[in-house]
Image (cartoon, helix red, strand yellow):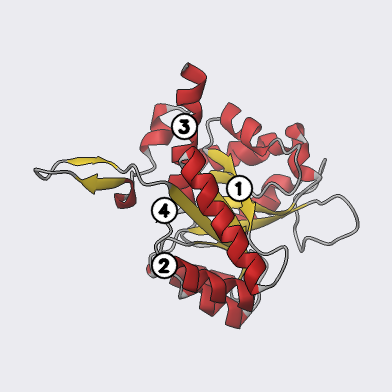
Amino acid sequence: MFPDGLRASRPILAATVAPAPGGNVVPSTIPAIAICIDDMGGDAGGTAKAMALPRDVTLSFLPYAAATPALALQSKEMGHEVLAHVPMEPIGPSDPGPKALKIGAADNVDRLAWALARVPGLSGINNHEGSKFSGDAASLVPVVQMLSERRLFFFDSRTIGRSQIVRVSHQHGVESAGRDVFLDNVLTDAAVKARLNELADKAKKSGIAIAIGHPHGVTLRVLASWLAEDHGVRLVPVSEAIRLKTERSQLLAAR
């Protein structure tokens, strides 16, 4: 599905393998989960707490937040995978933030280049808002072309069911997959824990599942506690989850 050079540019992470008897290394059969914390950089307290989570939690930074460049670099140095949480045009009146990508805007490539430059050490992007933009295939093409040139992946936040992100990304050789669970649409301990359990259940059924959360106090508190427990799954960065989802899709398509 992807050009060999693009696939080869993404190293296989240690979390995907396990020692076998005799010291050989074999693929892990433990279901995998990935967790991305969005909206990083705006709230200093929440960002600091998210950065203290296990290193395989992926952190996605708002490019327009003043502290983003320094905090993204620090997060990378701490071992987290770092993404740019790129603002994109929504359906409705909500404002996704400065320099949002918009349908038909002549300078979308310049806006994206600015966002990428604001997040040092990034491995990919995901969309902030974008329910309108992500459904427009023509507008996505120059975005994924730039990502392909820079060997970056596109994680689809799936803010709308008819998103074209994964399809258009794959057409241009860009690694892409969508999230499976939102952790904190309801901000209570019980609700966040229920969504985490749902994430684990989905991973056990399909082999891999990805969640998105935000740096809310309740989300980070419940998440830290939940990750310290054994739920029969292993935590991997979003890039690894996308690779696993892609391989699973290829296997299913080949049947």
- Crowd around label 1: few <14 · some 14–19 · many ≥20 (10 Å): many
Please tell me whether residue 60 is drawn above or below residue 153 in the rendered image. Answer: below
In the rendered structure, the answer to whether residue 201 lies left or right of residue 107 reads: left
- In the rendered image, which residue does mark 2 sit on? 229
**Badge number at residue 179:** 1
Tell me which corner region of the image, top left, top right, bottom left or bottom right, holds residue 168: top right
Task: State which mark lies toward you, 3 or 4.
Answer: 4
In the rendered structure, the answer to whether residue 66 lies left or right of residue 185 reads: left
Place of residue 18 in the rendered image (x, y in percent of width and height, measured from the top left): 24, 47
Residue occupying image coordinates x 58% and y 66%: 193
Identify which amino acid the numbered label 1 is placed on.
Answer: Arg
Residue occupying image coordinates x 66% and y 71%: 65
**Badge number at residue 248:** 3
- View extreme (top): residue: 255
Task: State which mark lies toward you, 1 or 2.
Answer: 2
**Badge number at residue 150:** none
- Crowd around label 4: few <14 · some 14–19 · many ≥20 (10 Å): many
Identify which amino acid the numbered label 2 is placed on.
Answer: Glu
| Earlier residue among tags 1 and 4 | 1
Determine the CA span between mark 3 and mark 1: 15 Å
Please tell me whether residue 171 is drawn above or below residue 27 in the rendered image. Answer: above
- In the rendered image, which residue does mark 4 sit on? 233
| Earlier residue among tags 3 and 4 | 4
Determine the CA span between mark 1 and mark 2: 22 Å
Determine the secondary structure under disc 4.
Answer: loop
Please tell me whether residue 170 is drawn above or below residue 111 in the rendered image. Answer: above
Determine the secondary structure under disc 3.
Answer: helix
Determine the CA span between mark 2 and mark 4: 10 Å
Identify which amino acid the numbered label 4 is placed on.
Answer: Val
